[in-house]
Image (cartoon, rainbow, N blue to C red):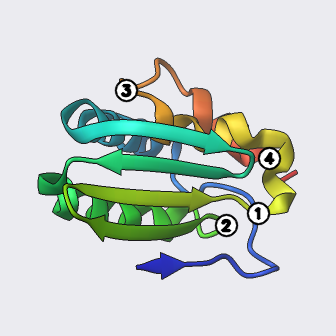
Amino acid sequence: MTAEAGPSTAIACTLSSGDFRQRLAWIAALNRDALHTRHRDGRRLELTYAPDAVDRVSEMVHREQQCCAFLSFTLHREAGAIRLVIEAPEAAAGSLDAVFEPFEAPVAAAGDCGSAARHDAAH
């Protein structure tokens, strides 16, 4: 499964503040339950999940494609693991910590941290 952002895609999350906090909590629960490894290299984040989390990881990709169309997601089903590669466009290079924070955090962040940062990245 692959989705790529187009050249005119805004570098911003479209979720409201409350929906963003709920999404952070949902991703944090997935990470607590099934995330094995994470590796970040520049604009590329690679996450490896337990194979039994394939449905939840696929759901996360689907949800994130709806609100963060500027990111590309590639899901690989491998023997013993689900590998998800998330890539940010070059235009997001100055805000990669904020862009990737929701996917790297093992627990939900307090407050409204990422939403403002992600929206600021578009301006």
User: Gap between marks 3 and 1, in whole Å?
Assistant: 24 Å
Amino acid at circle 3: Pro
Report crowding for label 3: few under 14, some 14 to 19, many 20 or more residues within 10 A (C-alpha): some
Tell me which amino acid carries mark 4.
Ala
Say which of 19 and 34 sits in front. Answer: 34
Closest to the observer, 73 or 116: 73
What's the distance in space between the residues labelled 2 and 4, CA to CA?
A: 11 Å
Location of mark 4 (residue): 121
Q: Which residue is mark 2?
A: 70
Q: Which residue is mark 3?
A: 106
83 is higher (above) or lower (below) than 50: below
Q: Position of residue 53 (x, y in %)?
A: 17, 53
Which structural element holds mark 4? loop
Residue 89's tag is: 1
**Comes first in the chain, label 2 or label 1:** 2
**Tag of residue 39:** none
